[in-house]
Amino acid sequence: MTETVVTRFAPSPTGFLHIGGARTALFNWLYARKRGGKMLLRIEDTDRERSTDAAIAAILDGLSWLGIEWDGETIYQFSRAARHREIAEQLLAEGKAYRCYATPEELTAMREAAKAEGRAMRYDGRWRDRDPAEAPTGARPVIRLKAPQSGETVIEDEVQGRVVWQNENLDDLVLLRSDGTPTYMLAVVVDDHDMGVTHVIRGDDHLINAARQKHIYDALGWSVPTMAHIPLIHGPDGSKLSKRHGALGVDAYRAMGYLPAALRNYLVRLGWSHGDQEIFSTEEMIAAFDLPQIGRSAARFDFAKLENLNGHYIRTTGDAELLAAIEALLPFLPQNETIGTKLNDTTRTQLLQAMPGLKERAKTLLELIDGAKFIFADRPLAMDAKAAAVLTPETRTLIGRLHETLAAVSPWSAATTEAAMRDFAEKNSLKLGAVAQPLRVALTGRTTSPGIFEVLAVLGREVCLDRLRDQAA
């Protein structure tokens, strides 16, 4: 009987859901979905000082916004501390772990000696075989695992291939601290085992942890999950991802106007390839995703590529769906950027009517909102610098004449206003552009907009005539 695939995403709630974490969650979710398995969510909140409720909420919200659904209840690691202690005590009783009474001063001396010799700090095992009766009075020990001291530890990694460590370079790791709290290493192993996790897919910064955790699995006689350590995400210049590169929370990408489907599509292609295909529906991602197609080198984050991909999704998303996305985004925007106070049945209808023209020019929802501001503008229009430069005395006179011509148009539509403007241009020996640009400035306060006849149709007769009157000489 084939085992059910169980993956897990296990973030620490010490900050937002960052972009690397979102990609790890996505890869776990896709792998499980492809195989009819489950993806579980575990919040690793054992660091009580740094874990916050706000960070937990941001992680859950970010996953939900991205469309990454986990199975079953969210598991909180700290609530399982008694189980972790039980396993440490079991290893102690079986002679596979021991109490270590090394003092902070002794550990500092080991650390300084290692530094002086240019090697990594390694606990020297001084309490491994000593009688606890020799312990200083009142000393509170940690519990350490008796790790193998010779031979090698091997992980057959689905991404990194065969990875080998010499056991002489790995020390006896701490399982329980002196205050009785379990360490991350122990908690992860016990939780993964108890949750039935079959595949651990995580960043390659955890690769050394895989060797240490295998020692715990082996001591307990438990089978080790299949491991897949994925390369981290770097900036475009190949350096570690920083905020200027895009090391932001998923909530920041939402506030910048990216669509969840576009961000999901961008993330899946960061380090994973499927031929030359760039655009994937969710169904296509699930069908195609597999671990061996993940490269071993770091992926490079590219904002321009994300923007272009988002532009594609905006152009191919239905107008009503885009309107809903805009409305969902408004609470995340600063007051000076929002149109929320002016959204009503009339402006919603106008925004929907303008959407086909707006979405051809926009790469983000913020650009869509910005392009639609002419619908929500107060009279008299605030002019941007380029638009103000167009409004010469001659232009204002022309706008007055355009007002007269358009006032006679009935019925009012893109087609009838276009016919009137073409006729006006022809009779006055003007190019259509010489008519369209003053119209655009008077109606939108800008020199760029959707097609001017679309603008006339969207705003309607009364608003257009009022705005033209405001700017006419």
Image (tube, helix red, strand yellow):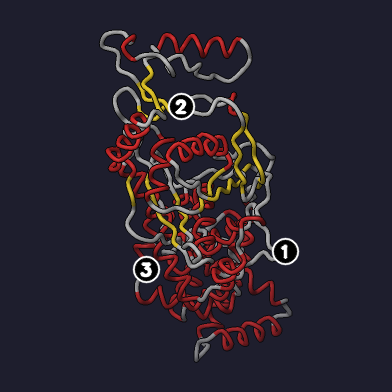
Q: Quadrant of residue 231?
A: top right
Q: Is residue 214 above or below residue 137?
A: below
Q: Position of residue 443 (x, y in %)?
A: 52, 69
Would you name the residue on which mark 1 appears? 275
Nearest to N terminus: mark 3 or mark 1: 1
Camera-side residue: 421 or 377? 377
Q: Is residue 33 above or below residue 108?
A: below
Viewer-side label of 3, 1? 1
Q: Is residue 456 above or below residue 375?
A: below
Would you name the residue on which mark 2 appears? 146
- Which residue reaches farthest bottom? 411
Camera-side residue: 416 or 470? 416
**What residue sits 33% from the left and 15% below the top?**
132
- Number of residues whose C-alpha sits closer than 10 Å to that of mark 1, classed few (under 14), some (14–19) or many (20 or more): few
Element type at mark 2: loop
Q: How many marks?
A: 3
- Left or right, 463 with reference to 161: left
Camera-side residue: 165 or 20? 165
Q: Which mark is residue 343?
A: 3
Nearest to N terminus: mark 2 or mark 3: 2
- Number of residues whose C-alpha sits closer than 10 Å to that of mark 3, classed few (under 14), some (14–19) or many (20 or more): some
Q: Position of residue 134 (x, y in %)?
A: 34, 9
Asked if residue 188 shows in the view, the reply is yes
Asked if the residues shown at circle 2 and circle 3 are in contact, with their CB atoms under 8 angstroms apart, the answer is no
Q: CA distance from mark 3 to mark 1?
A: 44 Å
Q: Quadrant of residue 86?
A: top left
Which quarter of the figure is the C terminus placed in?
A: bottom right
Residue type marked 1: Gly
